[in-house]
Every structure is written in structure tokens, then in C-alpha cells.
């Protein structure tokens, strides 16, 4: 659900940035109408609830099991990382990150297509 000041975080694994882009980015049909991405479909997110300009994603050079390493250079990392460290832990090694800003994920799907929903926290 759209919610200002909240970021939702997914961690997963991807072969490269092209694979992650194909998974996350919206597609468009011949008439210019947007088509939900596989990521949105997997996690049952209504594309009207997000602004694609507020999606941040990255594939890192290797797998990590710490928020500090995975979110290094992410927008608002200085606000997000301490909140995650306080209340959440990472159980696996990941090399890919998806952040949806101004969106609080309230779906039931926690794992799909090599990605795990981790948390929604304030970034302000």
C-alpha cells in the first residue's frame, strides 16, 4: 500500500543486473499501457500503489548476509540500516536488493522467485 516515508525491502539472488531489471521493471504494450512486472505479480502488488521512479535495485559483486553490506550506497541507508539491525536479521546470503520507497508491503507472499520480503521501515 502506498505510504509516504516507508520503504519495503526484498533481498534475493540474481545472475546480473539485466536479469533483475527484467524481473522488476514494468513493461509496456503496443498502446503504451503498462504491464505489471513479474516481481509485482509474484508479490501481488498493485502497480497503481507504487511509483516506478521510487524503485531502487542492485546486484552486488558477491553474496552478503548483512544489511550494512547489502544496503551500502542505497538511498537513506543511514536511516534504514539501523532500523533493520534493531528489529530484523538475515538468514541467508544475498546479492540482490529491491527497495520500494513510499510503499508499505502488506501482502501474504514472503518468498518468490529467489527473493524474500524482509521488512517495511521508515526512511525518514
Image: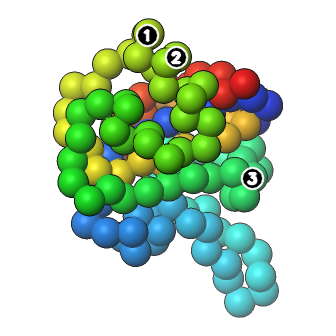
Quarter of the image where one finds residue 60: bottom left
Q: Is residue 23 above or below residue 57?
A: below
Q: Quadrant location of the C terminus? A: top right
Q: Specify how the rendered protein is coloured.
A: rainbow
Discs 1, 2 touching: Cβ within 8 Å: yes
Discs 2/3, front: 2
Q: Residue at x 48, y 26 (%)?
A: 81
Q: Secondary structure at mark 3?
A: loop
The furthest residue to the bottom: 30
Labelled disc at residue 83: 2
In percent of width and height, residue 70 lies at 36, 41
Q: Residue at x 78, y 86 (%)?
A: 31
| Total numbered labels placed on residues in the image | 3
Q: Is residue 27 above or below residue 31?
A: above
In percent of width and height, residue 41 lies at 51, 53
Q: Quadrant location of the N terminus? A: top right
Labelled disc at residue 51: 3
Q: Residue at x 44, y 42 (%)?
A: 72
Category of crowding for the residue at label 2, using alpha-carbon neighbours closer than 10 angstroms: few (below 14), some (14–19), many (at least 20): some
Category of crowding for the residue at label 3, using alpha-carbon neighbours closer than 10 angstroms: few (below 14), some (14–19), many (at least 20): few
Which residue lies under the disc numbered 1? Answer: 87
The CA distance from mark 3 to mark 1 is: 27 Å
Q: Residue at x 55, y 35 (%)?
A: 77
Query: Is residue 76 rendered to the left or right of residue 30?
Result: left
The furthest residue to the top: 86
Residues 77 and 10: in front is 77
Whether residue 112 is visible to the viewer of this picture, yes or no, is: no
Query: Is residue 17 rendered to the left or right of residue 83?
Result: left
Amino acid at each position: 500500500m502506498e505510504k509516504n516515508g516507508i520503504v519495503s525491502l526484498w533481498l534475493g539472488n540474481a545472475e546480473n543486473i539485466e536479469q533483475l531489471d527484467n524481473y522488476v521493471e514494468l513493461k509496456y504494450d503496443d498502446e503504451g499501457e503498462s504491464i505489471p512486472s513479474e516481481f509485482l505479480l509474484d508479490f501481488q502488488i498493485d502497480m497503481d500503489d507504487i511509483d516506478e521512479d521510487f524503485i531502487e535495485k542492485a546486484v552486488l559483486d558477491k553474496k552478503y548476509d548483512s544489511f550494512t553490506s547489502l544496503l551500502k550506497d542505497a538511498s537513506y541507508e543511514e536511516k534504514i540500516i539501523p532500523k533493520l539491525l534493531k528489529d530484523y536479521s538475515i538468514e541467508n546470503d544475498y546479492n540482490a536488493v529491491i527497495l520500494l520507497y513510499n510503499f508499505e508491503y502488506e501482502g501474504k507472499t514472503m518468498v518468490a522467485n529467489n527473493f524474500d520480503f524482509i521488512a517495511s521501515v521508515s526512511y525518514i
